[in-house]
Amino acid sequence: MKKYFLILLLSTNLLSAQHITPGFDAKEFFDLLSLLAQKNESKTADIVPIPDLYKLAYQSKEIGFDNQWSLWINDKNQAAITIRGSVQSSLSWLSNTYEAMIPASGVLTLSNDLQFPYQLSTDPNAAVHAGWMISTAFLLPDIKSKIDSCYQQGIRDFYIAGHSQGGPISFLITSELRQFQTSGKLAKDIQFKTYASASPKPGNLFYAYEFEKSTQDGWAFSVVNPLDWVPEMPFSIQTTQDFNPLNPFPLIQGLIAEQGLAKKLVLRHFYNQIDKPTKKSQRKMEKLLGKNVFKLIQKQLPELHEPQYFPSNNYVRTGAIRVLIPDEGYYKLFPQDPEKSFTNHDYRAYLYLAQQLYLKQK
C-alpha cells in the first residue's frame, strides 16, 4: 500500500510540474523579488506578502560574511534559491569592500581544514570580485546539498535570485552550478534560470563573456533601475593589460621603438602618459581594496587565507540587461532626495517598477 501511495504521489508531482521557460517574465521576476524582500533589514517584508504559489522549505544559518540563503518550493514543482543582500554588519560590508579581483578558477582556503576548489570559467583571463567569490564559496556546499535533495524528490527546475549584494553572488553561484553540470557533479537535466536585481558588477569582461555564453537565449537577467547607483559599482579601471592578447598595443610599442631618437622620446612620453596612470591606479586599488581590506577581514575570520589576486579591476556589467524605466508615479512615490542615497536601490523601488512592467505587459 505504501509503495502504491509513493508511486501515486510521484505521478501527481510529475503531472503538476511545469517547466521553466527562457525569456524575461515580469510576473516571474516580481514573485522572486517578493521572496527576496522577506526578512530583509528594511520593513519591506511588512508590506510585501509571500506569493501564494511559494512555500519556504529551508533557510540557512548565517555563514562566511554573514551570508544567508533560502529555498522556496512552488506549486509547479519548481524551486527558488534566494540569496540575501547586505545586512548591517561589518563582515557583510567588508565582503562588498573587498574589491580586488581573483582568478575565476582556483582554490580558496576558507579555514585551516576546509578548501573550496572552484571553476567559474575556463578562460584563464577571467576574474571575479574577491569578497563575493568567498561569500559564494561559503554558501555553495549547502546549496548544492539541497539541490541534490530536491532532485531526488523530482524537482528539475531552479530559479536563482539575488538583490543588491545577492545579485553578483547569484551570478557566481550560477556559473559554478553550470560547471558542476559540465563536470558531472550535477545532473544535466536540471535547468537554472537566474534573476539578479540591483546587482553590482561581479567580474571582468572575460568572466562576463563565458557567463553570458552559458546563459544566453534567456536564462539569466540583470534587472536595473537606471536611477540606482549600486549597479555602477565596483570602481572599474581598464588598462592595456585588460585586452585580448591579439591587440595593437604591442605593435604601437614596436613602432615607437623604430622611430628616430627625438620622435621616439616624444611618442613614448605621450604613450606612457596614457598607459602608466591606469596601471598605477589598478595597483593602488589592489593594495587598498585587496590587501588592506583583507587585514580587516582576517580579524573576524582568522582562518581564512588570503587568495592570489588577479592584476585587473576592469569590472563590467554581466547578464542580459533589463532596464526598468521609472514613470511619473515613481517620482511621486520615491522623491529624489540627495540625502537618501539608497532610495532608488530599495526593494520597494524595484517592486514598484516590476509591478508596473507586469501590469503593462498583462
Image: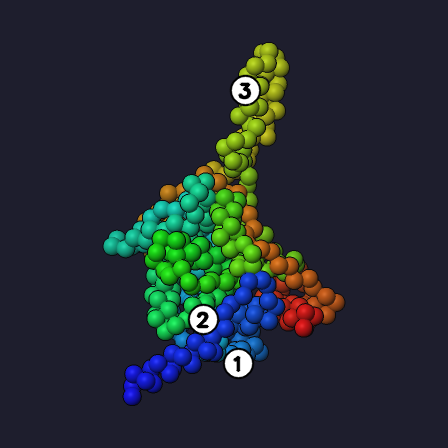
Image vertical order of residue 157 relative to residue 105, above or below? below
Q: What kind of residue is marked 1?
A: Asp
Name the residue located 36 percent from the left edge and 46 percent from the top edge.
106
Amino acid at pointer 3? Gly
Residue identifier under label 1: 52
- Residue at 58% in and 19% down: 255
Mark 1 and mark 3 lie on one chain; the one further toward the N terminus is 1
Q: Position of residue 241 (x, y in %)?
A: 50, 34
Q: Which residue is mark 3?
A: 254
Residue 56 in picture, x, y percent from top left: 44, 76
Instruction: Choose top left, top right, bottom left or bottom right for residue 176.
Output: bottom left
Marking on residue 83: none
Q: Is disc 1 in contact with disc 3, using a CB cutoff of under 8 Å?
A: no
Q: Secondary structure at mark 2?
A: strand
Q: Secondary structure at mark 3?
A: helix
- The residue indicated by pointer 2 is 79
> Badge 3 local density, few (<14 within 10 Å), some, or many (20+)?
few
| Above or below, 279 relative to 30 | above
Q: Earlier in the sequence, mark 2 or mark 1?
A: 1
- The answer to whether any part of residue 165 appears in the image is no
